[in-house]
Image: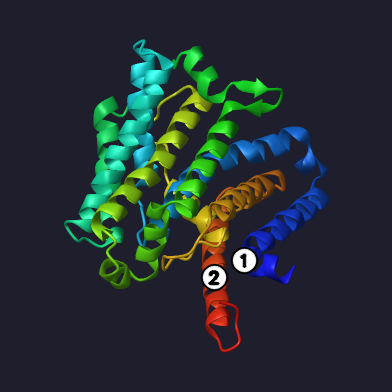
Amino acid sequence: MNKLFSHHGREISVLVAIAAMFVIFSLIDPLYISGDNIRDIVEHATIYGLMGLGVTGIIIAGGIDLSVGPALAFIAVVVARQAVSGVPPLLCVALGIAMGMVMGMANGALVSYVRLQPFIATMGTMSVFRGLAYLYTQAVPVIGVPRPYRLLVDGEMIPFVRASIFIFLGFAVFLHILLKYTCFGNHVYAIGGNEEAARLSGVKVKSTRTLMFAIGMIGTALAAIVQLGKLGTGDPTTGQGYELEAIAAAAIGGTSMAGGRGTVLGTVLGAILFSGLKVGLITSGVDTFWQYVATGTVIIVSASVEVLQTRLADAPGGRR
């Protein structure tokens, strides 16, 4: 039991927090644990989770990506227009994923080869991607996304379980295997833990980090593809503040903002907890604007817990 907690203490803590959250909000309003409400929580978690998973890999590699919200909007409007023009749904999905990889690679190149700080580089591309979304649509939403596309990415595969859940879980499994069981994943953790030591060990830091930015943006592309299926409209204004929600999901799950530490499972659980919190605030009648306060508070508290756990682990006699 001690070994389990030492290796998965953060994930267990988040599970306990999720259970406590369900108890508290169900006492406030019994409808919180209704089937429809739980389904809403899970469906919201797919968007936060897909983006959060991608951001997790980037943060582990010692980076950050603030451009994911506008990137989601740009990908969504481009895919929406292609779908409306009659392009087959699978090709639309492939286009969205390809766009995500190219945009992520651009971010990674700015960080790795131009040597900009990740915060500055992605803050710049955040504005670029939002502007491209407006230019592409002339600030007019793309409506009328065909039903075949929507069924492909968000139709019910089995009763009460939509395709978007399988997309979320599929990307989580892919990223888990990539980070935990491949040399590339080991290099990502090594770069985030100590970049200079990784370089001296023969790790190709620049190309590895750039590729992680590209793979990370695939999560945002999938989120854009799924959200487009849910809404049926490509809106250039969408994605406002989504970068905070993606970072919050990663932070809640135990991803260290300093890099070098984090898990896919933690981010999945973090997305569920964060989604449940937001839905709970709504069902409890809390003003929507307080969601922003909750988002910031969650990020601060989660980051503080991570710092505390690191200090305890580094202390004499602490678990490494």
* Above or below, 141 relative to 74: above
Which residue does the numbered mark 2 point to in the structure image? Answer: 306
Kindly identify the amino acid type of the residue bearing the numbered disc 1. Answer: His
Nearest to the observer: residue 13 or residue 185: 185
What x and y, as percent, mark residue 210? 28, 51
Total numbered labels placed on residues in the image: 2
Identify the residue under disc 1: 7
Residue drawn 26% across the image and 58% down it = 204
Q: Secondary structure at mark 1?
A: helix
Q: Residue at x 57, y 71 (%)?
A: 305
Tell me the amino acid under the disc marked 2.
Answer: Glu
Position of residue 162 measured from the top left corner of the image (x, y, whole percent): 62, 27
- Can I make out residue 143 in this image? no
Note whether residue 93 is visible. Answer: yes
Quarter of the picture containing the N terminus is bottom right
Q: Is residue 93 above or below residue 276?
A: above
Can you give x and y, in whole percent of width and height, for residue 5 in the image? 68, 67
Q: Nearer the viewer, mark 2 or mark 1?
A: 1
Lateral position of residue 184 relative to residue 291, left or right = left
Direction top: furthest residue? 86
Residue 235, quarter of the rendered image: top left
Residue at figure coordinates x 59%, y 21% from the top left: 155
